Amino acid sequence: MTNTDAVITLNDVKIVNEDSEKILLSVCADGWSGGKNIATLKASKQTLAGAVKVGNDSTLNLELSDGSSFEGSVDGKISNAKGESVSTEVGTVSVTLDSTSTWTLSADSYVSSFNGNAANVTANGHTLYVNGVALTGTK
């Protein structure tokens, strides 16, 4: 997602992530300028897997509902197609898990806000940082 303000709504869709780096979603300027870099991903009855990259100039609202699961991470380390770094810090990320949805961390993850029950997050040996503070109460 580059230079746009987009809403992605997924409902019981099968996704096969064939990206060699297992990047599920990247939201960043990627060297372009002039537009917004805002994405909202609303997932209902979804199984999501992979890395979510949100550049320091970008915003993501991730909403998981209706038994959705996400196995992955959130960070801001992004390189463009030439291999040049375009972001090293995560932007603004809001994650909402309803009571039936889960997140299993595949790496340390960084978000600005977290709405939901920490018990629905499986740390898997990693840490979820919310506004710079480790979230407690994860599995």
Image (spheres, rainbow, N blue to C red):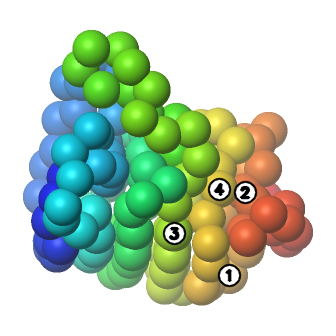
Badge 2 crowding class, 10 Å Cα cut-off, few under 14, some 14 to 19, many 20 or more, is: many
The residue that disc 2 covers is 128
> Can you tell which of label 4 and label 2 is closer to the viewer?
4
Which comes before the other along the chain, label 3 or label 4?
3
Marks 4/2: CA–CA distance:
6 Å
> Can you tell which of label 4 and label 1 is closer to the viewer?
4
Judging from the image, what secondary structure is the residue with disc 3 in?
strand
Q: Is residue 134 left or right of residue 83?
A: right
Residue pictured at 56% horizontal, 53% vertical: 90
Which comes before the other along the chain, label 4 or label 1?
4
Which comes before the other along the chain, label 1 or label 2?
1
The reply to whether residue 40 is visible in this rendering is yes
> Which disc, if any, is residue 110?
4
Q: Amino acid at mark 4?
A: Tyr
Residue pictured at 51% horizontal, 69% vertical: 92
> Can you tell which of label 3 and label 4 is closer to the viewer?
3
Cβ atoms at labels 3 and 1 below 8 Å apart: no
The residue that disc 3 covers is 92
Badge 1 crowding class, 10 Å Cα cut-off, few under 14, some 14 to 19, many 20 or more, is: some
Residue pictured at 14% horizontal, 49% vertical: 14
Marks 3/1: CA–CA distance:
20 Å
Marks 4/1: CA–CA distance:
17 Å
Q: Is residue 95 left or right of residue 64?
A: right
Nearest the eye: 81 or 134: 81
Which comes before the other along the chain, label 2 or label 3?
3
Q: Is residue 42 left or right of residue 100?
A: left
Cβ atoms at labels 4 and 1 below 8 Å apart: no
Cβ atoms at labels 1 and 2 below 8 Å apart: no
